[in-house]
Image (tube, rainbow, N blue to C red):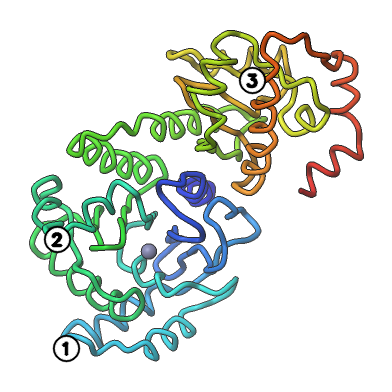
Amino acid sequence: MQDFIRISKYAGMRNDLAQAGGGNTSCKLDDHIMLVKSSGYQLADVNGQAGYSRVDYRKIADYFKEHVEAYAEDVFTEEDGSRLLKEAQIEGGRASIETFLHAITGKYTLHSHPLLVNILTARADAGNILKELFPKAVFVPYRKPGAALAEAYDKIYRAGQAQGADGTIVFLQNHGLVVSGDDADTVIGKTEQVLSRIAAYLGVDDSACRAATQLYKVIGEIEALAGNIVYLSENRYLSREYAGSGLVEQGIWDHAFCPDCVVYAGKKVLWLKKEYDRQDILDFMEAHGMPTLVYYEGYFYILAESVKKAQEIENVMSFAARVQYVNKGQEMHYLSDAQEDELLNWDAEKYRRKRA
Ligand SMILES: [Zn+2]
């Protein structure tokens, strides 16, 4: 369960992996039961209590074996799909039609819509490029998401396995990526490997995204921070060009001029040096309390419980950046340490932050 949540949050926190409610994750508990992210839920919001459905994936796999594989194309209709999904569903929210992509893969599966992968899968010669870069991966040509895709996926996946593909990496043309493995580290690591290889092939710098994954791993080992996501800000004021070199790198970022800023982002920005470790974060926590806004190698990251909260904090911090930037050279009035403490312990403010 912890691994299932970790993979879900990893993909959900990354704008480049899952846009809006896209992408899904699953975890097979035994020979029958699989947890799969429910439709209508965002990946980063999956937790122990909500955001997933329980389905009998054996029913799905057997159905395909008996009724679909041996027959010609397009035997599996949308009606068959909804009926089978309903039959397989045990409990929890509505399982999405993409549940079929998970029924025959490994123990943990992540289906994402990565920007880098789709730069290639959107090309006319996607199949050839991907075969060259990932000889062992499975490639599924475009089908309408839903029953048609499920059918093609099942047939090609099994045919690929019969020909020696290990089935842990699947590319869906004009759509995305499916990666599976025995635990969260394997699935996240493999997804990152695919992305790095494509980034190198395209000559694209994806270091900011990789840094988010690295930081996610490090905070996952700190009890008080585990469970948070790491959200990479793409706000133009929270950029190296503006607040990065203009404020943080000059050592003059201080958002303690406004009560909301303190409530949303704590006392200080955490500026991590290139080679940082867990201890650097623990030292910061000892001195300044919980970190929320992190600056690393020219990028701003936000630690928060959900994407929605991270975006609210981003909103407030973008405002903080602009006020400070325009006031450079002016003497500002800051809240005292005692006034900050007062805010951070103020129940009404806490309540407002929690509820938001
Ligand atoms: Zn998809």
Q: In the picture provided, is 39 more to the left or to the right than 352? A: left
Give the answer, above or below, for where 34 lies relative to 47: below
Distance from Cα at disc 3 to Cα at disc 1: 66 Å
In the foreground, 178 or 35 = 178
3 and 1 marks in contact (CB < 8 Å): no
Q: In the picture provided, is 301 more to the left or to the right than 123? A: right
Distance from Cα at disc 3 to Cα at disc 2: 46 Å
User: Which residue has dot 2 on it?
Assistant: 124
* Badge 2 amino acid: Ala
Of callouts 2 and 1, the N-terminal one:
1
Measured from the top left, where is residue 129 in percent x and y? 11, 51
Q: Is mark 1 within 8 Å of ligand 1?
A: no
Of callouts 3 and 1, the N-terminal one:
1
Q: Which mark is residue 71?
A: 1
User: Which residue has dot 3 on it?
Assistant: 325
Taking the image as four quarters, which one is ligand 1 found in? bottom left
In the foreground, 278 or 234 = 234
Q: Which mark is residue 36?
A: none
